[in-house]
Amino acid sequence: MRDLSRLLQPQSIAVIGGGTWCANVIEQCRKFGFTGDIWPVHPTREEFAGIKAFAKLTELPRAPDAAFVGVNRNATIDVVRSLSETHAGGAVCFASGFSEAAAEDDTSNDLQAALVQAAGNMPILGPNCYGFVNALDTAVIWPDQHGCIPVDRGVAILTQSSNIAINLTMQQRALPIAYAITCGNMAQTSQAQIARALLDDDRVTAIGLHVEGFGNIPEWETLARDAHARGVPLVVLKAGVSEQARAATVSHTASLAGSDAGAQALLDRLGIARVTTPAILLETLQLLHCNGPLAGNWLASISCSGGEASLVADLATTRDLTFPPLTPEQKTGLRAALGPMVALSNPLDYHTYIWGDVARMTQAWSAICALGIDLTLSVVDYPTTDRSAWRCTVDAALAVRAQTGRPFAIVASLSELMPPDIAAELMAGGVTPLHGLDEALAAAEAAARIRPPHALPVAPAPAIDDTRTLTEAEAKARIASHGVIVPWSCRYEVRADGIAPISDPRTEHTGDCFYSDTYAIKGEGMAHKSEAGAVRLNVAQEDWESTARDIGTQIVLVECMVTGGVAELLIGITRDPAHGFALTIGAGGIWTELLRDTATRLLPVTEGDIHDALKSLRIYPLLTGFRGNPPANLYEIETAILALQDYVLNGPDAVAEVEINPLICTPDRAVAADALITLEDKT
């Protein structure tokens, strides 16, 4: 881990180059009040931007703490080498044309490798990078406008996109931004490493990251573990849901975005909240700055409009949020403040009977803001003209926060209806100003999802090239050897004079089998046997030969049918080089495509992880005995999944994909009725 403290908290800044961008860096330093040394470096100018210039780096009074390298990509490598040799604290590499341009320029990857080699142990940001704003120490290496103001403490925002960073700093939401840092190509110093360095600054209250690709998973695990230990919550805006976004990510930053399900599973495993828009990212950071992570997802809402109360309740139905019924203690306190004319509920319409009476508003709002409520929302929309009659809401909110110490937020139903001066006053008093009802609820959901990271590291899943697919019989033999229960089966060759058994691949192991008196016959060598009519069920033994001939394949698989099932699951593990082995658990059989009811976890998983995933499925009631039907054996399901994991992680094969569909779940067993395995072809 390189020491980034001199780079990010510099006392001296060298600006190398003579273009407009370099002049902008110096201008931004002056405007922001940077009090350290600024040293322009240019081979022919005696002064630059009104400051004495130095012809060479070696002429500087001392090695700079930070440098902005604003020369072309080829010259950047030489400058970075010189900075490293003079023991500078670090550099921002502004030039583009490195790995992000690999599709257009065959030399770009080589240039990036040369840049990393030239830097040596000196940390660099970029290339293709704007740099950073440190609003705590008024240190700016930033060649453009920004919206930051000096602060004493606040959140950090890291993004690979310089343009998104600029936009986020321009927010008008009273969010104190301590650091805004762009990462660019991350040729040497990764986003996770930068965020980890910020944990050493106890003025940072939360960290928001716009992520296009994760890269080194162990670095993110270290970040998540250390952030949790230090009480600094993390929230991620992750790109890459759509195919277009994934394509843009690769071309823009040369990052491997990977599958979105894998990305979500990784964030869940790391205990990091995920959001979907820049606005929700900012709102979540506001909540985290004021309160830290929410203890849970129980909310209360109070407003002086029935329409707003209904809207809050409706919007919450699409999110993992709960508005619990009012307790007797809450009702007593509310009744004392509001009188008998208000129907008490959560969300609450408290009408306007007490509007303007700060003492009674404080009493009512404090009553609903009770122990057990993780966040209380007071919906207030401020007019754009005379706001004097709305002063009572600010005073009451600040009093509630001061008296109760509970998380409390003022929410404007539209972002335009939260004035910046009101937002700043609320924020200063510990009340979170939230902009927009839907954004507020999304932020609450995210702040409630921050958890301690998983204790087990993610199992690596390096990419493989050529693959081959096993037959169903071969696949069942592999997983059965690791403990998955499969039906008794035997392969038969269809000949002119009848059907003849082929050496059963299962005879070489002692895996458990399911036996029954009814049989299924399946044609071998077809990817979608059911759709092709190559699966026949409930075949009597005397009809094996005629059924096999009717299917029409040279080889058939005869196996016992699994009876007594109460539910069918899909269990799959795929190799995701960007995130690890992704385990998918979901509705199986004919319901797989129809319901799309799945949960994804990264390997390795524990029994508890599997149980939590099962409970998240809509079909979970089937597994526990729906409407008087017998329940499935959850222990056997978990055992089957752990056995499949053992095959992938500890077996002899480099597995690209393994799928059981369906895993038929009975009150006693969990049996793999069908299996597919694709693995590395080493031939």
Image (spheres, rainbow, N blue to C red):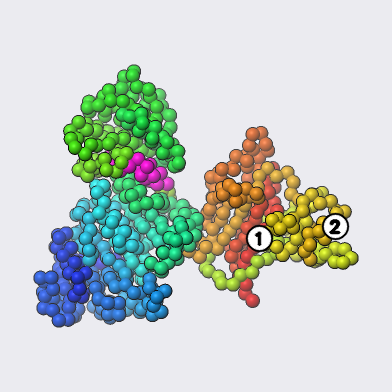
Q: Quadrant of residue 499?
A: bottom right
Q: What main secondary structure does the magenta stretch of the protein show?
A: helix
Q: Which residues are magenta?
A: 430-449
Residue 416 position (above or below residue 143): above
Q: Quadrant of residue 430?
A: top left
| Percent x, y of residue 144 | 22, 63
Image quarter in which the C terminus is found? bottom right
Instruction: Please state if 275 lies on the left or on the right of 617 as rendered.
Output: left
Q: Residue at x 19, y 78 (%)?
A: 57
> Is disc 2 surrounded by few (<14), some (14 to 19) or many (20+) residues within 10 Å?
few
The secondary structure type at the circle numbered 2 is: helix
Q: Quick check: 55 above or below 376?
A: below
The residue that label 2 is drawn on is 546
Q: Residue at 74% across / 49% down in the picture?
A: 562
Residue at far right of view: 497
Residue 437 in the image: state x and y as whole percent: 35, 40
- Front residue of 529 and 129: 529
Could you tell me which secondary element the residue under label 1 belongs to? strand
List the residue tagged with mark 1: 676
Tell me the kind of residue under disc 1: Leu
- Residue 615 on the magenta span: no
| Residue mark closest to the camera, 2 vs 1 | 2
Kindly report the distance in space between the C-alpha atoms of the residues bearing marks 2 and 1.
27 Å
Looking at the image, residue 305 lies above or below residue 409 = above
Q: Is residue 439 magenta?
A: yes
Q: Of residues 600 and 353, which is closer to you in this image?
A: 353
Residue at image point 27% right, 66% down: 130
Left or right: residue 511 versus residue 626 is: right
Density class for disc 1 (Cα within 10 Å; few <14, some 14-19, many ≥20) is: some
Image position, residue 13 (x, y; %): 19, 69
Q: Residue 214: in sight, yes or no?
A: no
The quarter in which the N terminus is drawn is bottom left
